[in-house]
Amino acid sequence: MLKTDKVFDPEKIDFAEKMAELSDHDLLIALRKRNNYHPRAAKAAINEGIKRGTIKSETDLEKEEFKPIPFKRSGFFVRAESRKQAKGILSSLILILYVFSLIPFLYGGVDIAAGYYLMAAKGAILGAITLYFAYRTSKTEKPADAIKLVIASTLTALYSIYHFWSELDKLGYMEILVIVVIFALVLFTSFNIWQITRRLRSI
């Protein structure tokens, strides 16, 4: 089968040749999974289908036997079925980290009022770095920038958890739950941003 879930440069791929190498069965699957492929790969699959007589024209793709196969979701990661959907998911996830990165600034205001200027500065730096890489990733959509965002947001989450923890008189079940939820949400969001940027390279 044609693999499109890996990072590659679509400009260096001869999709027509790749489609020509597929068996009739695999070509049929490729036609049904056309919405998951890079536009050039989808077009090559359609052209090969017409060439072999699998379909007479693109109109045949509306038939039940060529109904698109949804992209499978797997465990921890959010999966997109098209480039448009992937971009929409990426924007939503980035927005979550934009909001999250403001937490250190809020804590910073409290720290300044209490005279803890160094702690406030550390929080502001971490928040600013997370904001920067969230913005950069939203613009470049590159996995390399997304990895930096994962690191920055994780450090910011650890700082926020430490700050929250230091304000507590004792650590109860509810406090532990809050800490776990914060850390899990940040990891889930940042790793999915990285996964979506990788997905955008293949569709």
Image (cartoon, rainbow, N blue to C red):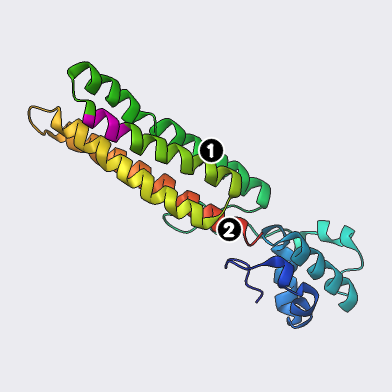
Q: Is residue 53 left or right of residue 77?
A: right
**Can you identify the residue that label 2 sits on?**
199
Question: Measured along the vertical axis of the image, is residue 60 above or below residue 146?
Answer: below
Residue 77 in view (yes/no): no
In x, y percent, where is residue 62? 82, 56
With 134 as the anchor, is 54 left or right in this view?
Answer: right
**142 up-or-down from 163: above or below:** below
Residue at the right extreme? 56
Residue stretch in magenta: 118-123
For the residue carrying disc 1, how many other residues have a C-alpha within 10 Å: few (<14), some (14-19), or many (20+)? Answer: some
- SS state under label 1: helix
Residue 92's disc is 1
Is 145 in front, or is 89?
145
Q: Residue at x 58, y 50 (%)?
A: 141
Secondary structure under tag 2 reads helix
Kind of residue indicated by mark 1: Ser
Q: Return the x and y of residue 2 as percentages of the image width and height.
A: 66, 74
User: Magenta region, mostly helix, strand or loop?
Assistant: helix
Residue at 92% over, 68% down:
56
Instruction: Tell which of 58 and 106 is nearer to you.
Output: 106
Q: Which mark is residue 140?
A: none
Query: Foreground: 61 or 40?
Result: 40
Q: Quadrant of residue 179?
A: top left
In x, y percent, where is residue 83?
A: 66, 51
Residue that appears at 39% across and 34% down: 101
- Magenta highlight on residue 60: no
